[in-house]
Image (spheres, rainbow, N blue to C red):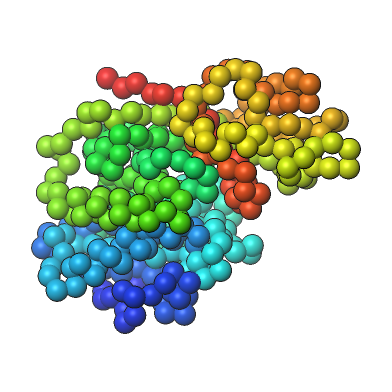
């Protein structure tokens, strides 16, 4: 299923993401030589509707089409079948960023493929790993790390002054690669925003030109820790109005603009239909149900019981069903 090559395919530098399925046929791992032989690993399109990474890589390779790359580059182009139809993943597919080593998902050919990519790259001893994503909701550009070590913090700080440390969900690419190289996730805003491509491209050029990470620091980085994830059960209907004969839950649209803002106790998270049981679940990083720690019902309103900081809040039902409503975070201070 995995296509592993050491050249840029014809048409790759001018293709649109929706054309990659016809061009590449299968997920593809591309190895390119550079002046420094230790490769930088970059993955993109693990979610087919998150296109910023591909277009940043495409622009990077165009720039270096007549000159050598500063460093060897290994590029993994992921869910091209979903990219063809602008979906996170197809209904009959696993999420490509939940099936890397460490995943709790059942064995599938796609999970085996991620194991193969990890094995291949572990042997190459990468300088660093960068996984590029977009958000459905409104978020600033930020970085994510899975291990609190100096090199990972430096990688994050070269992209932005905001970073998130998380250990759940399991089976993500960045966590799998953190076992053998510094690893970071770039969250580049919404796919439709071209500034994300500009930012990702500038970052890739910066990292490719770095000789080491040890001589740099991460001063000024504001670090958050993901403490919980908000899910809506499939049996609960989501809409814009609650009441008799209507939807079970209606999310507060004012939270669209509150990602990376602290939310105060008493703030409404959603309206719920009277009598609706368990309209959502707040799950801790250890997969415990901690809903009652964070939420309470006040006159058919779900409100916050304690202050939290939101990230990735979305009201898109498709995004909620395939992933979650949002994450809750706390600021993390490290000495």
Camera-nearest residue between 232 and 123? 232
Camera-nearest residue between 334 and 272? 272
Q: What residue sits 73% from the left and 42% below the top?
A: 240
Task: Looking at this view, name the residue that lies furthest to the right.
Answer: 244
Task: Looking at this view, name the residue that lies furthest to the bottom.
Answer: 10
- Please provide percent x and percent y for residue 256: 56, 38
- Please provide percent x and percent y for residue 137: 52, 44
Along the horizontal axis of the image, is 237 left or right of 93?
Answer: right
Q: In the rendered image of this protein, does residue 111 appear above or below residue 279?
A: below
Can residue 100 be seen here? The reply is no
Q: What residue sits 40% from the left and 34% below the top?
A: 165
- Please provide percent x and percent y for residue 179: 33, 44
Q: What residue sits 54% from the left and 23% below the top?
A: 263
Along the horizontal axis of the image, is 298 left or right of 89?
Answer: right
Quadrant location, the C terminus: top left
Q: What residue sits 44% from the left and 35% below the top?
A: 166
Camera-nearest residue between 93 and 82? 82
- Please provide percent x and percent y for residue 23: 42, 79
Along the horizontal axis of the image, is 313 left or right of 241?
Answer: left
Q: In the rendered image of this protein, does residue 188 appear above or below residue 142?
A: below
Q: In the rendered image of this protein, does residue 306 appear above or below residue 141?
A: above
Q: In the rendered image of this protein, does residue 287 appear above or below residue 180?
A: above
Can residue 192 be seen here? The reply is yes
Q: How many marks?
A: 0
Q: Quadrant of residue 289?
A: top right
Along the horizontal axis of the image, is 260 left or right of 86?
Answer: left
Q: Quadrant of residue 253?
A: top right
């Amino acid at each position: 299923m995995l296509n592993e090559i050491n050249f840029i395919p014809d048409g790759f530098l001018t293709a649109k993401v929706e054309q990659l399925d016809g061009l590449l046929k299968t997920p593809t791992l591309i190895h390119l030589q550079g002046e420094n032989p230790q490769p930088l690993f970059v993955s993109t399109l693990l979610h087919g509707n998150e296109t910023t990474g591909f277009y940043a890589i495409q622009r990077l390779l165009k720039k270096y089409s007549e000159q050598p790359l500063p460093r060897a580059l290994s590029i993994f182009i992921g869910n091209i079948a979903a990219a063809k139809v602008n979906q996170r993943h197809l209904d009959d597919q696993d999420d490509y960023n939940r099936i890397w080593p460490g995943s709790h998902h059942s064995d599938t050919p796609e999970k085996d493929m991620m194991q193969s990519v990890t094995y291949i790259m572990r042997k190459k001893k990468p300088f660093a790993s960068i996984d590029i994503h977009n958000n459905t909701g409104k978020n600033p550009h930020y970085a994510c790390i899975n291990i609190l070590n100096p090199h990972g913090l430096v990688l994050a700080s070269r992209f932005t002054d905001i970073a998130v440390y998380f250990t759940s969900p399991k089976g993500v690419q960045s966590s799998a690669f953190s076992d053998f190289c510094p690893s970071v996730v770039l969250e580049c805003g919404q796919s439709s925003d071209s500034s994300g491509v500009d930012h990702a491209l500038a970052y890739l050029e910066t990292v490719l030109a770095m000789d080491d990470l040890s001589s740099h620091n991460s001063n000024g980085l504001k670090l958050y820790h993901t403490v919980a994830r908000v899910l809506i059960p499939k049996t609960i209907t989501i809409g814009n109005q609650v009441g008799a004969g209507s939807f079970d839950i209606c999310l507060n649209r004012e939270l669209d603009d509150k990602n990376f803002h602290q939310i105060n106790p008493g703030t409404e998270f959603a309206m719920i239909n009277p009598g609706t049981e368990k309209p959502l679940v707040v799950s801790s990083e250890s997969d415990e149900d901690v809903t009652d720690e964070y939420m309470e019902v006040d006159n058919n309103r779900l409100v916050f019981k304690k202050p939290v900081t939101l990230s990735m809040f979305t009201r898109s039902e498709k995004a909620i069903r395939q992933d979650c409503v949002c994450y809750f975070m706390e600021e993390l201070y490290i000495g």
